[in-house]
Image: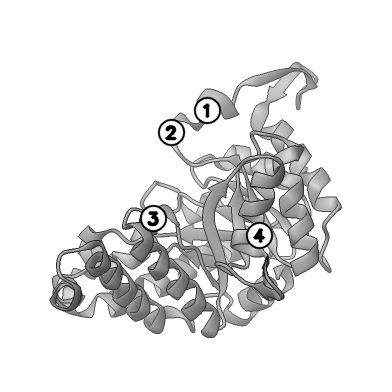
């Protein structure tokens, strides 16, 4: 699946992924009214609104982008109907030829980790049948529990030719409370006794990546936030064969010119995420003229602008 992601990026010339992270506050009133007219102001009604919203968004942008990243919590908040909307979204995006990164941030050990891997990337035995539960192409994974938590995902990735993105340096402001702590006994960049935890995790990701290679890149990628470009530059060298999923562009403050070092010299190796900056573009002053009625067209315009912004920065890098 890493090869399909690369092929999609090359085909679209768009090293970006759109986060399908719907909130009811993003969904235009006319869509909510349609859903509530059929299901009432219920969890089913909310889930239907999410599904209708996602479908219109995907129809408007699928030809421009290589991948989408639905964040499962935004669907889980609406209970079982929300999870149905998540599954319908995953299936529809795959029908459109998009790579689907399930932003599920799972992290556990043993049989529990294996069950998570099966749910999102694998197949489960039901009698004589092997059935696909959610069916994403990639999943995000928390490495805090170590190899015990990652190995079950690696096993499924090898079997199904799918992938994972491991949290290494996240984009949120308080990430440094743990991720930036120096690990003593690990020699740092300047020979000091201690290197940040995110770098130690990056080294482990590189080790896992080497054991699960595709043609040129590994099935094992990493999440490195756009809001910490200097750290991203270091981690690019630490994990040369891992694709980096980069959250934090746009709404969280990450700028295209800061992200060029997340990419390798081949122009690949990174994919930059934008969520509400795309899916709720019509709420921004820049795209307000589209109005809520044409929210999907506003999202398409925002995608075009983001692609141009990222590619311009990469070209200026030379």
Q: Foreground mark, 2 or 3?
A: 3
State the mark number for residue 76: 3
Location of residue 15 (image quadrant):
bottom right
Q: Is residue 94 above or below residue 157?
A: below
Residue 306 position, x and y percent, is 44, 66
Left or right of 19, for residue 82:
left
Instruction: Give the percent coordinates (x, y) of residue 312.
Output: 52, 66
Badge 2 is on which residue? 173
* Position of 318 relative to 88 (above/below): above
Q: Nearer the viewer, residue 200 or 72?
A: 72
Residue under label 1: 176
In the picture, residue 232 is in which quadrant? top right
**Disc with the residue nearer the chain's start (1 vs 4):** 4
Kindly check if marks 2 and 1 are in contact, taking CB atoms under 8 A apart as contact.
Answer: yes
Within-10-Å neighbours for mark 2: few <14, some 14–19, many 20+: few
Q: Secondary structure at mark 1?
A: helix
Outermost residue, right side: 211
Q: Earlier in the sequence, mark 2 or mark 3?
A: 3
Mark 4, residue position:
118
- Among numbered discs 2 and 4, the one appearing first in the sequence: 4
**Residue nearest the viewer, comparing 22 with 288:** 22
């Amino acid at each position: 699946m890493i090869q399909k992601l690369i092929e999609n990026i090359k085909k679209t010339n768009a090293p970006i992924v759109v986060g399908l992270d719907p909130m009811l506050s993003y969904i235009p009133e006319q869509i909510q009214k349609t859903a509530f007219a059929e299901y009432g102001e219920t969890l089913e009604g909310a889930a239907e609104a999410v599904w209708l919203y996602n479908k219109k968004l995907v129809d408007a942008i699928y030809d421009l982008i290589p991948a989408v990243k639905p964040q499962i919590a935004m669907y889980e908040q609406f209970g079982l109907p929300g999870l149905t909307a998540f599954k319908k979204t995953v299936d529809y995006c795959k029908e459109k030829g998009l790579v689907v990164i399930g932003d599920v941030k799972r992290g556990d050990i043993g049989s529990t980790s294996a069950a998570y891997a099966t749910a999102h990337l694998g197949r489960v035995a039901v009698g004589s049948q092997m059935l696909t539960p959610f069916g994403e192409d990639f999943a995000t994974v928390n490495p805090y529990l170590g190899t015990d938590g990652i190995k079950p995902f690696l096993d499924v990735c090898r079997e199904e030719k799918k992938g994972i993105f491991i949290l290494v340096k996240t984009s949120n402001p308080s990430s440094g409370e743990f991720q930036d702590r120096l690990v003593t006994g690990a020699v740092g960049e300047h020979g000091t006794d201690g290197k940040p935890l995110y770098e130690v995790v990056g080294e482990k990701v590189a080790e896992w990546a080497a054991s699960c290679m595709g043609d040129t890149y590994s099935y094992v990628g990493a999440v490195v936030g756009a809001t910490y470009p200097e750290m991203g530059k270091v981690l690019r060298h630490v994990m040369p064969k891992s694709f980096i999923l980069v959250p934090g562009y746009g709404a969280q403050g990450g700028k295209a010119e800061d992200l060029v070092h997340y990419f390798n010299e081949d122009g690949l190796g990174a994919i930059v995420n934008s969520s509400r900056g795309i899916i709720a573009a019509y709420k921004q002053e820049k795209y307000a003229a589209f109005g809520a009625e044409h929210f999907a067209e506003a999202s398409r315009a925002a995608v075009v602008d983001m692609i141009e912004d990222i590619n311009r920065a990469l070209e200026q890098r030379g």
